[in-house]
Amino acid sequence: SRVRGERTFNSREDCKLMRLARQAVLVTACLAMLTGSARAFMPSAKVPAMLRGAAKATSAARPGAVLTQARRGRRSVMTPQMTATAPADLMKAPIMDKFELVKEDMIDEYGAKVLMFKHKKTGAEVMSVSVPDENKVFGITFRTPPSDSTGVPHILEHSVLCGSRKYPVKEPFVELLKGSMNTFLNAFTYPDRTCYPVASQNLKDFYNLVNVYLDSTLHPALTPWTLKQEGWHYEAEDVKEPLTYKGVVYNEMKGVYSSPDAVHGRAAQQALFTDNTYGVDSGGDPLVIPKLTWENFEGFHKKYYHPTNSRIYFYGDDDVTARLELLEQYLGEFDALPQAPKDSVIEWQKKKTEPKVIEQKYPAGDDGKILMTVNWLVNDEQLSSQEELALDVLDDLLMGTPVAPLYKSLRESGIGESVLSDGLETVLQQATYSVGMKGITDEDKVDQVEKLVMSTLEQLATDGFEQSAIEASLNSLEFKLREFNTGGFPRGLSFMLGSLSSWLYDRDPTEPLRFEKPLADLRARLDKGEKVFEGLIKKYLLENKHKVVVKSFPDADMEAEIAKNEADELEKVRSKMSEEELKALVEETEELKKRQEAEDPPEKLALIPTLAMEDLDREGRNIPIAVGEEQGTTVLRHDLPTNGIAYVDVGFDMRVLPLELMSYVPLFSRCLTEMGTKDLDDIALTRYVQTHTGGIYSSHSTSLKTGDGDFVPEPEVMSHLFLRGKATYAKNKEMFSVMTDMLLNANLDNKARFLQMVLETKVRLETQVVGSGHSFSAGRIGARYNVAEYVSELNGGIEYLLFIRKLADECESNWEGVLAKLEQVRTLLIDRKGMIVNLSAEDKGMTSVQSELENYIDSIPLREGETKIQDWQSEMKKFEGSGEGFVVPTQVNYVGKGSPIYKVGEKTSGSASVVSRFLRSSYLWDKVRVVGGAYGAMNVYSPQSGMFKYVSYRDPNLKKTLDTYDGTSEFLNDLSKELAPAALANAIIGMVGDMDAPMSPDQKGFTSLDRYLSGQSDESRQARREQVLATTAKDFKEFGERLEAVAEEGTVAVIGSDSALSEANEALKLDIKKIM
């Protein structure tokens, strides 16, 4: 298992991630959160609005489709070389009898040909983007403004993917998950729209996905049973037992409403938007969801899911004519529905003339603290492109870095533990601005937050910003726009989300995709001396009376009150039911479970379009690598098309650190980039990085070497701290210079700043353990068996949270001792002996890097004497008992169980990964999500260590889920006897799709570094691929036999509520600890 290391400027970035959770749900890809497999350059500072797209999404159809980079989607940019045009004879094609070409455009920033069509019969709008990008994207989006908080758009988003006219199986979506080579497959609900995007690099697979999604959205097989499963229903298995609420969305939103950030954020949004659709919760309030009726559910689909109310999007290198011909097969069946666009218009919220204050409570543990934000509605009329860009720069100037004046004043105030820095949001029709603090312990200081915010803004409106700060912010923004690094996230999807921020509101969809002119115009205004940002502060913040202050106070009794109120409500419903009605409900419960557990007939499954084994590439995709040595240091070079950017990763071997120092590593890595150096204070350092580079980031990772054969190797740890930079070739000197300065001269002796980082880390971990408890559960299990996961637990898990709490006190009582530990980490780590350098660039970039590389290596100290590698294995903490339970304030559970299933020296095969992946989208999906009502269930298998783990996500059950895990072996044994050839092929195809997932150039370079360090050769990877392709039904049976070890001897780790753990513990005998 690999853990993504803590990045620089966590407070800001984590607030962005928290906002995703608070707004609800593009959860970090479940597998990535468990394995830390994400390799993208994760920007530590704020992502420009042009590259963001999903911050306000309320739901994803499944946990796992994370929009890591494209946060808000206002503008995006591709490399200039990308050019494509529509076929010259398009207008002569017969299909043009069905479509009108409304607009033809060229987005010069990225050489993209855009054709806007209107379907003549229905009025459906189609955006066709042609670029030479094989990662093709399709999306259909409907404007879906709700009028209440029953969550109807969210529940429909789940439900339309549960069978359709052409594909009458239980869940075509899941069948696609099993056997598609998709690079993106999900759906999301926003406060005013529902999006259904897919992506694939394989043309046949791509059109298969498009067909299923079009039929699912336009012709879903909705029934009352669908609403019961995905939305809510009363459940009773016996007439004598109490009723319960069940439903996937119902439990998902109970998890969302367990997060203090979610509760606070919703209050802020609803208080800002009192008069339009943004004032209700499109995701659904658990208290209101049970009010949704079948009539309203069905009616919502009929009203809004019509081609006339749709925005349809294509992107990639496929033929435009083929796109339109496919669409006509579906759109041609419909007549226009002129009323639909009128019914779905998003009304503007007019600004109020008086500010207001909202006070509320949220469910918390005994140590809960106050949250407070100041929130503004920015505009009640359309912003120009230039004005929006200027606001985005202003946002970065105010709060985009740790030294930005508004962020810095709050951070250093001591009022709270962490800054809430959502800042500017531009995804919806109207922009908002939000800033505040969390972790406030003194109720008397809450109002000081608003006073400090306003006084800081007033000072900035008067004095302005330093020119160096403005130039740094503009350069940083421009670098991100030109780089357009979306990692493994499809670029075309970023395009789509960006265009929708204008297109959805009947404006030009190409306008948000341009940035050259607005940026040039903004620079021209600044060059003339115009006080652009001071004016924006006055107009949109200081003089803006549409302001809402939200204060959220912890209530340790609220969770119990919510549970009691729910039980009382259910008992009230039950008391009104006759004996016959109760019997009917029990029968209905049984019938629903029968439907959920029923197998789809083979003849219906055969209707789902799939690839064939012949469509797969038998040869894997390798990454170019040249291994060399410079002055005794290993240097890896990757000749990749980076568009004039050099990506540099410098790694230091952390195995030289005693185990007692490992928990200091995440904070030490932040010190490198946040604390300043001997010659540059924190402000000067930040501005230098922004001005001359695309960013300098730190991370750390610990994992086991994979070995180069088919056997579980003896545990050998690889553990590194990385400093990662990127810059244009012309700025290599500046990049290496500042990276050297950070490593050698970081100012560690700043008690106040370090303590603030400690408190920010504490707040972040406490938020994550409630919202992403499954990753903590999985890490805790692995830490019992695996030295790498034990180390990762020390610098990222529950053990790390406990350490951080103690460290906060130690900073106050023994700063000299803490400083000595940090200095010891630097002394041991920054050593040329344990260093490796990884370079990704074109050949000409390698040449320009060389001289700077030599100077850099020469500057790093070369310690004398033999380097001691620590024996962490012998120092591992010994865990006892059957498992652990951790009590947090939540209405749902995260249930994990796992153990090694292969011992050291035992032979493994790539086929095991096929079976493991299959389980996630079959047995676990059906039993834990569909029947059990959890939002998600997943498993992780590691060939390196032989470990296997199950975890559930936002799960209403506990013991029942563990019983489901224990039934996996029997399921696989039975399946192996009747596994259809088509099902086996789909399992293999899906696995190959994962293996061939697209990567950005920097991801490729870093992935190749990881493979080199772990001892994984191209030959061994190809051997694994061939084993995957050769998987048989027998492999399913054998893997099931291996899983018996988990059922019999596995360790349990549960993050959950006090009541759930107490009830289950009579049977489980867990060691229960209250951590919040």
Image (spheres, helix red, strand yellow):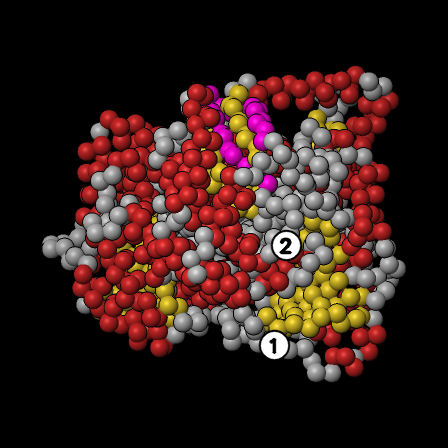
Q: Which residue is mark 2?
A: 501
Which amino acid type is marked by label 2? Ser
Q: Which residue is mark 1?
A: 84
Instruction: Examine the rendering and report whether any part of residue 722 can be seen.
Output: no
Check the image and name the residue furthest to the left.
864
369 is within the stretch colored magenta: yes
Q: Nearer the viewer, residue 275 or 11?
A: 275
Please provide the residue range marked out in magenta.
Answer: 355-377
* Left or right position of 302 against 722: right
Picture coordinates of residue 749, whole percent (x, y): 22, 40
Q: Nearer the viewer, residue 399 or 804?
A: 399
Picture coordinates of residue 426, whole percent (x, y): 58, 49
Q: Which residue lies at the image location 79% right of the left edge and 16% below the top edge? A: 575
Dot 1 and dot 2 residues touching (CB under 8 Å)? no
Q: Secondary structure at mark 1?
A: loop
- Which of the 4 quarters of the picture holds residue 835? bottom left
Foreground: disc 1 or disc 2: 2
Picture coordinates of residue 649, whole percent (x, y): 33, 60
Relative to 213, say whether 55 is above or below.
Answer: above
Which amino acid type is marked by label 1? Ala
User: Gap in Å between the C-alphas at discs 1 and 2?
Assistant: 24 Å
Q: Which residue lies at the image location 35% right of the left edge and 70% below the top edge? A: 729
Instruction: Examine the rendering and report whether any part of residue 328 can be seen.
Output: yes
